[in-house]
Image: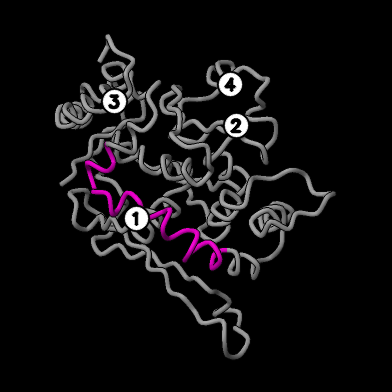
Amino acid sequence: MNHTSDREVIMQKMRTTFEYRQHLIHDPEKSTTILSVFPQFLDTKGLILQDFTLLFGSESASRLFERWPTVFKAKVIRLAETLTSTPLLKRLLSSAKEKREEQDSPEWDSDLSSFLLLLHLLSPQASGRKKPHKISISQAVDHVVVFQKACRSIQEHLEAEENRQPYILATGSSKEAISQFFIVVDKKLIPCQESSSLAAIDELFKVHFVFSISYDLPLKNMYTFLQTTIYGIDVGTTSFPAACRIRAVSRSDEGPSPGPDDNAVLKCQLVCPYGGSLYHSTDKALSGKFVSRSYP
């Protein structure tokens, strides 16, 4: 693989080395070397998607594209409309409904804006052991996606960033005109296969499983919702313990006006049958933010 640029050859050889890569990823002493041993992730599009499909099958791999536009997007927008308005919420709703006013500042496209509404519905979780603190919705958005003007140096952005959990880096002339999406992992860029925002969200989620990276704690509710409700990956059947499931309960739009406790088209409940946190208490966070975690 180090001596070819043929994409088909690289894809085939990466399929062949999948089992070896899984052993490497789940070895606490070697997991941080994965992007050095397999630098193809940094210049060959589609490898994240291929490894995720090998892990969970094509049916799970395609669920975001099948379910978000047809089932969840409209429900999330309707529920967000019932929340107390803020400038950020108003801008995201306008962009999600593709009804942005001319005076509004540029915001993300409809798919990404509707997805970011989840952060208003599934509030960021407090993080930190000694002094837990909760970040704002605006800060949580920056944990998911960062915009970079196409004319600015991406390398300077990476050098200025602290080492943190994976996020989307979107480059273009404006938030409405993104030319390319990347997933940033350990201060390295993994190019997304497609140029759509929904595809970038898909790869952001999948990179956590492909490299066995723990969720960004403030975003744990959002990621667990994606994992269990969208992709149908029930953590109770895997080996990491606190099987957290979010049940999405759809409410009918018909009937009397909802009361203050029923003001939801979509209600999300965390169900943790084993108690505790999402991760093993014995998981060792490595310098590159990788954690060892086993899969079926």
- Amino acid type, label 3: Glu
Residue 77 picture location, percent across and down: 60, 64
Sort mark 2 into few (<14), some (14-19) or many (20+) by Cα contacts within 10 Å: some
Of mark 3 and mark 2, the one earlier in the sequence is 3
What is the spatial separation of the Cα atoms under label 1 and label 2, in whole angstroms? 27 Å
Question: Camera-side residue: 243 or 251?
Answer: 251
The quadrant of the picture occupied by the N terminus is top left
CB within 8 Å, label 4 to label 2:
no
What is the spatial separation of the Cα atoms under label 1 and label 4, in whole angstroms? 32 Å
Q: Secondary structure at mark 4?
A: helix
Q: Choose top left, top right, bottom left or bottom right for residue 246.
A: bottom left
Mark 4 or 3, closer to the camera: 3
Where are the magenta residues, as a range? 51-76
Q: Residue at x 44, y 22 (%)?
A: 188
Q: How is the image coloured?
A: one colour
Of mark 4 and mark 3, the one earlier in the sequence is 3
Q: Residue furthest right?
A: 103
